Amino acid sequence: MEEGFVEHLGIKIHFEVYGVQGPTILLMPTWTLVHKKVWKAQVRYLSRHFRVVVYDGPGNGRTDRPLDVAAYSQAAQVGYALAVLDATGTDRAVLVALSRAANWALEIAAEHPARVHGTIVIGPAIALPPGAAHSTNTTDMDAVRPRLEPSAVPRLGTDPWEHWVKYHRDYWRTDYTDFVWFFLGQCFPEPHSTKQIEDGVGWALETNGTVLGVESRAPRPDRAAIEDWCARLTSPLLAIHGTDDLVAPLGRSERLAELTGGELEVIDGGGHIPLARDPVRVNRLIAAFARRFQPGPRRTWPRWDRRPKKVLYLSSPIGLGHARRDLAIARELRALRPDVQVDWLTQHPVTAMLEGAGERVHPASRWLANESAHVEAEAGEHDLHCFQALRSMDEILVSNFMVFHDLVEAEHYDLVVGDEAWDVDHFLHENPALKRFAYAWLTDFVGFLPMPDADPRETLVTADYNAEMIEHIARYPRLRDRSVFVGDPDDILDARFGPDLPMIRDWTEANYAFAGYVTGFDPSALADRAALRAELGYREDERICIVTAGGSAVGADLLRRVVAAFPAAADKVPGLRMIVVAGPRADLSDVVSPSKSLELRGYLQQLPKHLAVCDLAVVQGGLTTCMELTALRRPFIYVPLRHHFEQHFHVAHRLHRHGAGRRMDYADLTPDTLATAIAEELGRDVRYHPVPSDGAARAATLLADLF
């Protein structure tokens, strides 16, 4: 990414440039209320195929916030766009304009045709009459512009009094935050739009009501100007508009298409900002439009008898537990279907593990946005609000789904397996026509749950996410050709998805097949501890404590705290040898001074073997390692991440069912308490409920039936 500023009329405009191959797509700013992050679901995908330029208009983002009305005029806005094109060395671009920006794009396309390949407008807020068919059932926000006299009576889609009071610059100065929540709610009438509304509110709060009031005084192009530009348009135009747009009537896009001979894409049920609420559809529309202006790539279409049986396996990169079980399932699947080729679409550190196991990682994996890095950035000290981390990963999930979509569109796959591939599952349900393969979904938990300290909004949003998932499955029950729960019915929490929603266990039993737990190895093959210790270099008389906290860097704080307790633990346990497994992403070189008694290891390819011979393990509360230790019948202490609902509820329930592990809270881990617990638990005889060892074979059988 390249970035910079360009000055026009004394205003510094911030821009960013992504990608290198043409043509260039200019993603224009819209109303001052939001900044260029409104295009976050488009930039990563489009910049893999095109050159993308995006910039902040005056009043928000990293651009100046002038209090001069002239800085927000039509002429100034057109000038900013042309200045950005010049500053980025862009001779010609595809203009993409949301709402207010349609005015600027139309003038540029008409007055500067040599600079424009074509124009895409989304929910255009322009001075064209909406037409009789749309005058009574859609809010026309232009009708309540703050510059109008108080006698003006707006046409409204909700309570007229609320619109009149809030859509006014006096209200913005005194109750700006309330207006922002109100207006963004109008922008997203689609159900389950909590994240998009929250994003918009966050961006809007980066400016203020005074700036918005100044901007609102700038005159806009009238109908005659719009119609004149339409008549002189010589390049293609595409209008995208939602039928439920409460800000700009659909009839405007209909009229715009008539005047220009352009195309109209109507999103039935869509609101004012489909680029955020239906990003996959909008991304595909923008890309298809822009491809008109670049040479077509070579394509190969194989006949039916030239298509080998292929599986695309999507393995969650958050840690390494999913990868171990997925590898075991893939091997069992090959045993059942020897003619099947398995390709993997995943990220580091999973890619390193799979390549080490001789698997084929698809080259498209390099385009995936890094989920592990995002999760690590969201984490605090042994604290990961994993539900919020998933919500805030929406930009990454859209981008990664588009990588997946490009791949399955270019290559043929008989079966796609998604192990907690949240991006693929969500966006396939939102775009069911894109499914061209058998599809299996795997997970080891069902249901997001609020933490005990959740505020009312978090509780509401958590239930809303569950409700959306339930509605997806109810509407498209066959989109998932198979839903596989990695566990048994008794592993499911007896809790409710949310108020007025089903019980989690009842719903899961009705919608899933059960594979049993998948350990990724046969515990009976690791029963000879003496032989394994000799193989791994451990003496028989050593008292081994393995400390591990997953494949990401989130667990580094726990590892540091355990290391700090080592001297006290060694005093209580003579001959204690502690092996700290940092994994591929955590750096503990600053806290561990290697010795014969305290060792630091990176990634261990054969971690289950080390767990099988240990006298105790201290681990994070992740399901995989805890269940591996349960299957191996080794004593362990587990410390759930704070605010990690899966570890606190789902994993804890499963471990309680097996009678496995000693739970400790991170806040209680002083060197003395941890050393005491290590001394008490090390070598303890355990009697866990057994973990069946045929889970991988059962899961593979469920998948093999889909060919």
Image: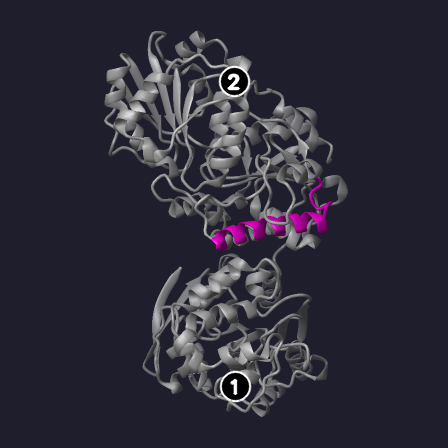
Q: Quadrant of the C terminus?
A: top right
Q: Which residues are magenta?
A: 456-482
Tell me if 252 is positioned left or right of 611 in this view.
right
The x and y percentages for residue 17 are: 42, 64
Which residue is label 1 attached to?
111
Tell me if 518 is positioned left or right of 583 in this view.
right
Amino acid of disc 2:
Tyr
Name the foreground residue: 96 vs 614: 614
Q: Quadrant of the N terminus?
A: bottom left
Identify the image quadrant of residue 380. Answer: top left
The mark total stands at 2
Give above or below for 330 relative to 394.
above
Name the foreground residue: 577 vs 507: 507
Which residue is label 2 attached to?
688
Mark closest to the chain's N terminus, 2 or 1? 1
The x and y percentages for residue 271 are: 61, 68
Pointer 2 local density, CA inside 10 Å: few below 14, some 14–19, many at least 20: many
The main secondary structure of the magenta stretch is: helix
Please check the rendered image and state whether residue 457 is part of the magenta-colored stretch, yes or no. Answer: yes
The x and y percentages for residue 120 are: 58, 72
Pointer 1 local density, CA inside 10 Å: few below 14, some 14–19, many at least 20: some
Q: Which labelled disc corresponds to residue 350?
A: none
Give above or below for 255 relative to 578.
below
Residue 299 seen from this side = no
